[in-house]
Amino acid sequence: MPSRSSALLLLLACSMGCVRENFFQPDARLVTTSSPAATDSVLVTAGRHYQRGPVHNLLLGKHYRPVWATPVWVPVFDPATAVPGGLKPGKLGGGFQSTSMTVLGSDGREYALRSIDKDPYKTLPKIFRKTFALNLVRDATSAANPYGSFVVAPLAEAAGLLHTTPRPFYVRSDENGLGEESELFRGKLVLLEEKFEDRASLTPAFGKATDLLESDDVLRDRFADPSHRVDQIAFARARLFDLWIGDWDRHEGQWSWAVYPDANGPTIYRPVPQDRDQAFFRFKDGIIPWIVSRPFFVGKFRTFRPEYESIEGMTQNSRFVDERFLNKVTSADFQRLATELQTRLDDDAIANALKRFPEPVFAQEGEYIGQALEARRAKLPWAANEFYRILARHVTVVGTDQDERFVVRRLTDSTTAVTVYTLGGKSDRDSVFYQRVFRTNETKEITLHGLEGKDIFELSGEVRRGPRINIYGGPNSDKVTDSTRVQGLSKKTRYYDTHSDNELTKSKETWDRTDHGVKMHAYDREGT
């Protein structure tokens, strides 16, 4: 007998059939007597094609369908006046879902122009692109609030975060100001926001920043040299804000980084979150989405509501960057940041931000989202503790491509200290690169990455219990001295390396796995 979920999926397939040829609304603009060229603003819907009947809503969820279908007034996009000095077309974006283009300001600044509606056609395997599965994933776009990103900007400002400020526009059906690609945008509701990806985009809000970089560049620089470091407290504040607004899609591609060099110290990178399409996400309100969002299925699809859902699910997409850029942040740090955000994000800040919704949308959603934000604000310390607990369970400590010394001291049954020194400094005190004391009841595993330098790993201490230590030496010759002793049958030190001229002094705790070494770099997703 088929399971209930299989039966539901079969029912869904029968009800939706093959892929709909004309899924999307032909034009966001509602029919009026005036031509779009004769007015500064027009009445549009973000996606009236998401309107469905009660059976469909029962199966797939109501989501934000009424919001997508609600008529709202937006300005008409005019490349000559959208920003001071006007805009010129640039390169077409490479996104898989939104239609996007980089447009260029006369002052050298770059902006992103992208459709609010999405088409996930390219994200599906080819075998499913002509089946009901495409209808299904297209329909799921209605779980996002099409106007949520406009509300997030003033909230981010109140939280003390660097941020973009998107604005909505309608692209006329006869627009030619976007060059050869104009046709792709005609008739669409779009947003225009700053692209904070180079020094030309810097504004006074960035203070003494000298450049803006993408995450790949920051990862490369951070792991190449110990003089490049991420402001982990600033990143933790930004990540708590993500949890508060229910934005689960915060992978490394969703960030830019402001660069703050110091002639007498390290270069610091501070986060600039971008792309807030998933803020206030509403998914688990239909039978199929409820099944899909189970932790054993697609746990990252968390619904924004007064109560926080799975923090582990909400941070699934960001795990790679979280592990590398939050490995110094303590429980006390997270609690202090949560309390600070509670103060900053007061009732007035929430009320003022919600006014960024178009009036008809505010009438539908303003009260509920406002009450949910207030309830989640009250529980932010709890969410911060849950997030810290997840991060602390398995911690990744990454050196650089320079020579370093990793010192692990098993102090007591309840604490383990890890310190990383850069070699060649004036003294150990002057060359401390990383330092943290881990608690055994929080941390089960610590992974050390030496990367490409000639590194030294020193482990000491005799205890009854403690976290497992994984060592990835890297491609160059390293020295490992392990004199630890942990009671129990399992070996608590595992050493992975490629075949090279390494010096290894083992204890009974050491499990030599050099024949299973990895060669990838720690900033590559496949590296661990």
Image (tube, rainbow, N blue to C red):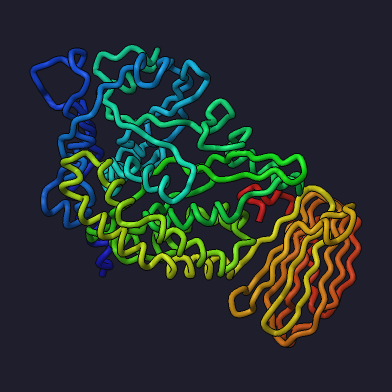
Q: Is residue 133 visible?
A: no
Measured along the vertical axis of the image, is residue 434 above or below residue 468?
Answer: above
Residue name at image x 19 percent, y 43 percent? 361
Report which quarter residue 377 is drawn in: bottom left
Looking at the image, residue 402 sits to the left or right of residue 199; the answer is right
- For the N terminus, the image quarter is bottom left
What residue is at 57 percent from the left and 52 percent from the top?
A: 321
Residue 394 position, x and y percent, is: 61, 67
Q: So how many labels did they put on this image?
A: 0
Q: Residue at x 53, y 28 (%)?
A: 201
Instruction: Give the quarter of the figure containing the C terminus.
Output: bottom right
**Extreme residue in the left direction:** 33
- Front-lying residue, 474 or 130: 474
Q: Where is residue 155 in the image (x, y as percent from the top left)?
A: 37, 48
Residue 447: horizontal and vertical position, in percent?
69, 64
Residue at (45%, 64%) from the top-left corner? Answer: 339
Task: Judge whether 356 appears above or below 107 on screen.
Answer: below
Res. 514 visible in picture:
yes
Specify the quadrant of the image occupied by residue 138.
top left
Q: Quadrant of residue 397?
A: bottom right
Instruction: Give the left or right position of residue 119, taking residue 210 as reference.
Output: left
